[in-house]
Every structure is written in C-alpha cells, then in structure tokens.
Image (cartoon, rainbow, N blue to C red):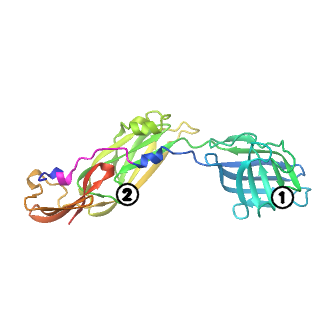
Amino acid sequence: MGDIMTLHNIARVPVMVCFLLSAMTIQAAPVKWEISGLTFADGGSGSGYFVFDADTAAVSDWEIDVAGGTTTDLPAIQYNVNNSSSDARASDFSDELMIVFDINIGLRQLRITPFSSLTNSGGSIAIDTQTLLNGSGSVECISCAPFRIITGGTLTAPPPEPTLQLILESPAESDTYSGVSTLRGWAVAEEGISKVDIYIDGNFFQSAPYGGSRGDVGSIFPDINNSGESGFALAFNFSDLSEGTHTIRVEAVTNSSGFGDSESRSLSRTSQFQVTKFPSPFLPADQSPDLSGASCVISEQTVHILDTLVDGSIYDVSLQWRTADQGFQIQEIR
C-alpha cells in the first residue's frame, strides 16, 4: 500500500463494458418514404411523406396532402400527426402490408399498399393499385363506403447512411479521475477511420493512436472491414488538469467516403468528468504516500484510507470500485 502505484496509477484492465450489449442490437434507422404521383380514380391527386420503421412496423411521422376529385364526400384534406392516427397492418383480404392513416377513427381513411415490402434500406416501390372491393388495399374512404381507388403512385426513400459508430469508454460521464490513466474507446466506419482527435475543455490535445485489437467490436460489426482493430487509447495524466469538472470531446474522422461524394465524415462523443488530485501533479518515488500512520475504513465498494501522509501533509483518500476499469480508482482526496 505504500507504493504510489496503489493510490495514483492503479492498473486498469480493459473489458467489454455493458453498453456494448446495447450496441449488439443496433438497428437501421426508420426511413422517410416520399409519396409522389399519387392519383385517384375520380381525378384526385396527392403527395407527401411518412416515416416507417420496418423493424417495428410502426409509422412515426406523416404529412400527406390529397386534392379532391369528383367524389364529393372526399374533398381536399391533409393527413398529419395532429389530426390523424396511423397503423400498419395486413390488408383486409390479403397478407400485403397496408399503411393506414385514420381521421376520427374511420370517419376518413387513406390506405396505401406498397407493391412490395418496405424495408429500412430505402428504394423505390410502386403503390399496388390492384385494389379489392370494400375498401381493401390502396384507397381513400369514409368508413370505406364510399371510397375512391388509388390508381397510381410511387414510394421513394434514399438508402441509409453507411455505418459510422464511435464509443468513448473512458473517461466515463460523471466519473472521477486522478493521476495517469487511459483515454480509450473505439470507432468503426464502412469507409474506414482516418484519425481520432481528442479535445480537452474545447482545446485540441492530440490525435489518439488508432487500430487497437477489439475482437468484441469485430463480432458486433462483422461486415465492416477491420472492425476488430478499431480501438483507440492514449495515456493521460489527469492530475495535469485543475480539480473540478472537465469536458472531453472525441472526434472520429473517416476516410473519403466513396458513397456518392469524396468528402469524409465525422462523429463526436462528449463526456464530462471530475478531477481530484494531490497538490503536485506528479509524485516521484521519494514522495510516495506514507501509510504507516494511516487507518482504513471500508463501506460497500469504497475503501477510505485516513491520515495518509503526502509531502508533509495529511490527506484522506477514498478508493472506489469502477466496473469499466475493473479496479479500485481514486474517487476523492481531501
């Protein structure tokens, strides 16, 4: 316990922390489908959009304008999130997916049936105009009698952005640090990562070495080249900072994308952390903490070392178990 390594530079063992479990369930983002060329049998027309998540079969946003035709019971109107509900279900007489926009629970409905399944990969899909009777399929209706059949239209959505993920593991949000530790995390992109820049309190510090072995990340992103060598890490003396709250921002910059343009992309993560320290930012061997007169109090996952002598002054030092680092770290010096 008398060695400075005990209090000021406890060895940290990198582990796959629990947030990676959530990364394993990363899903494609919902897609915004634009409706164009929408026509009705009575001469009406329409356009707009809706946002659909194929993973959950849920519509989260929509705004669709329809113009009136010769069906006088169905004048011009806008379906939007404020005046209507949405539903995604099988059509009345088939297993085809039908997107339904409903004003006042059946008083007026717009039913759009894609010719093929909607996915989160985007694309261009025609609206199925082979509508059955009784309001099933692609129609607009009032309690589905009367109704007007949709005779044409296309749903179009852009392809999703290629994958770009960045995780900052340490320093973690709201954790306390002291002495020499490691700034670390990982970043992956389909076009590759060119650099990972570190900013402390808004000022550029340096680029972190990138390419460390991360088999855990490779198993999450098996389709991305070199995802198993996606780690970054950098030794950092937190005691060079003043006591109190500080901010770190990590920015991962990709290689030129090759996905429609030559521009690189970037993604940032930010964390606020606390610094506690002895008055000197570095204690040489001849100033190592003297624990000969110290006592120890243990409470749950915290070890309190009382009356620690450092450079002629007495301190109480609290060590707390930190799961992400798999070790006891300095939590407070007073």
Residue at 52% from the left image edge and 42% from the top image edge: 163
Q: Is residue 37 left or right of residue 220?
A: right
- In the picture of the structure, the residue carrying the numbered disc 1 is 143
Three-letter code, disc 2: Glu
Three-letter code, disc 1: Ser
Q: Is residue 54 left or right of residue 73?
A: left
12 magenta-colored = yes
- In the picture of the structure, the residue carrying the numbered disc 2 is 173
Q: Is residue 47 left or right of residue 329?
A: right
Residue at 36% from the left image edge and 36% from the top image edge: 213
User: Tag on residue 306?
Assistant: none
**Element type at marker 2?**
loop
Judge whether 121 appears above or below 50 on screen. above
Circles 2 and 1: CB atoms closer than 8 Å = no
Image position, residue 279 (x, y; %)? 18, 62
Regarding residue 251, the answer to whether it shows in the image is no
Q: Which residues are magenta?
A: 6-17
Q: Residues within 10 Å of mark 1 (few under 14, many from 20)?
A: some
Which residue is at the front of the view, 15 or 158?
15
Image position, residue 26 (x, y; %)? 51, 45
- Calculate the distance from the C-alpha at mark 2 to the C-alpha at mark 1: 53 Å
Q: How many marks?
A: 2
Which residue is at the front of the view, 141 or 33?
141
148 magenta-colored = no
Which residue is at the front of the view, 122 or 132?
132
The quarter in which the C terminus is drawn is: bottom left
Q: Residues within 10 Å of mark 2 (few under 14, many from 20)?
A: some
Regarding residue 214, the answer to whether it shows in the image is yes
Image position, residue 53 (x, y; %)? 63, 48
Q: Of the residues under marks 2 and 1, which one precedes in the sequence?
A: 1
